[in-house]
Amino acid sequence: MKQPKPFMNEFQKYQQEQNKEIKKLVSKAKYVFAWVMLSQDGLYLEVKKGSVRQGMIDYPEAYDIHQFDLRTDGNLYIN
């Protein structure tokens, strides 16, 4: 017998759709760079695609599509 799907509120549905779009961006990217704060300033450091995907599994609510920028050079920047 199939288990019923858990109830999803509107925010959870939005988050799920947003994470699907983020996964697509990560897959399309050549390289992924994340903004890292260092003392008063910061810089972009390369991160592994797998690390981003694992973070989405561990903390899906922490990811916001508006922080991701797939640029014309094929690189994905996370702010």
Image: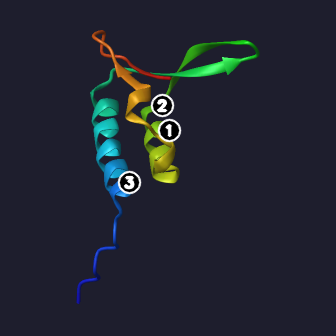
Name the disc covering residue 48, or none.
Answer: 2
The kind of residue on which mark 1 rests is Ser
Secondary structure category for the residue under label 1: helix
Q: Nearer the viewer, mark 2 or mark 3?
A: 3
Number of labels in the image equals: 3
- Residue that badge 3 annotates: 11
* Coordinates of residue 57 in the picture (x, y in percent): 46, 51
- Residue that badge 1 annotates: 51
Find residue 39 and report its image quarter: top right
* Coordinates of residue 75 in the picture (x, y in percent): 36, 17
Q: Nearer the viewer, mark 3 or mark 1?
A: 3
Contact between labelled residues 2 and 1, with CB atoms less than 8 Å apart: yes
Where 7 falls versus 37 (above or below)? below
Secondary structure category for the residue under label 2: loop
The kind of residue on which mark 3 rests is Phe
The outermost residue toward the bottom is 1
Q: Is residue 68 left or right of residue 41?
A: left
Mark 1, Cα crowd under 10 Å, few <14 / some 14-19 / many 20+, is few
* Coordinates of residue 61 in the picture (x, y in percent): 48, 49
